Image: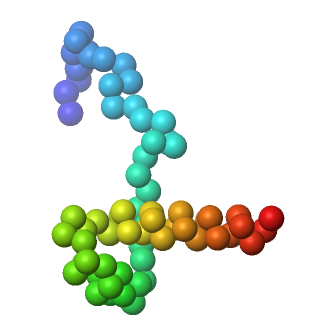
Amino acid sequence: MKKEYDFTNAEQGKFYKPAEQLDMPIYLDREIIEYILKKWKKKDEDFSLSKIINALLKKDIEISEKLSN
C-alpha cells in the first residue's frame, strides 16, 4: 500500500447505491428451477427465469389479496 493516495479528481458517492435499489440474490430449490425450465422454456423464446419468477410471485400476491378481502 502506498503511504499517500491522490484523491484530487475523486468523486464522492460515485458508486453509492441505496439498499432498496440493490438486487438481492435469491436461491431456488433445484426442483423449482427444473419445473420452471421444463414448463416455460419451450413456450417463450425470450425466456427469463427472473421474469417468470416475478410473474408467479405477482400472481400469488394478487390471489392472496383477493382471499384476504
Instruction: Find residue 15 and report its image quarter.
Output: top left
In the image, is residue 35 above or below residue 10?
Answer: below
Please name the residue shown 53% across and 63% down the image.
58
Q: Position of residue 52 (x, y in %)?
A: 38, 69
Instruction: Find residue 45 and report its image quarter.
Output: bottom left
> In front: 48, or 65?
65
> In front: 1, or 16?
16
Q: Is residue 30 visible?
A: no
**Quarter holding the C terminus?**
bottom right
Total count of labels: 0
Q: Position of residue 21 (x, y in %)?
A: 45, 42
> In front: 13, or 48?
48
Q: Position of residue 44 (x, y in %)?
A: 25, 72
In the image, is residue 38 above or below residue 66?
Answer: below
> In front: 26, or 9?
26
In the image: residue 59, left or right of residue 39 = right
Please name the residue shown 22% across and 81% down the image.
42
In the orientation shown, which residue stands out farthest toward the right?
69
Q: How is the image coloured?
A: rainbow
In the image, is residue 8 above or below residue 2?
Answer: above
**Quarter holding the N terminus?**
top left
Please name the residue shown 35% across and 81% down the image.
36
Q: Is residue 45 visible?
A: yes
In the image: residue 5, left or right of residue 17 = left
In the image, is residue 38 above or below residue 9?
Answer: below
In the image: residue 38, left or right of residue 67 = left
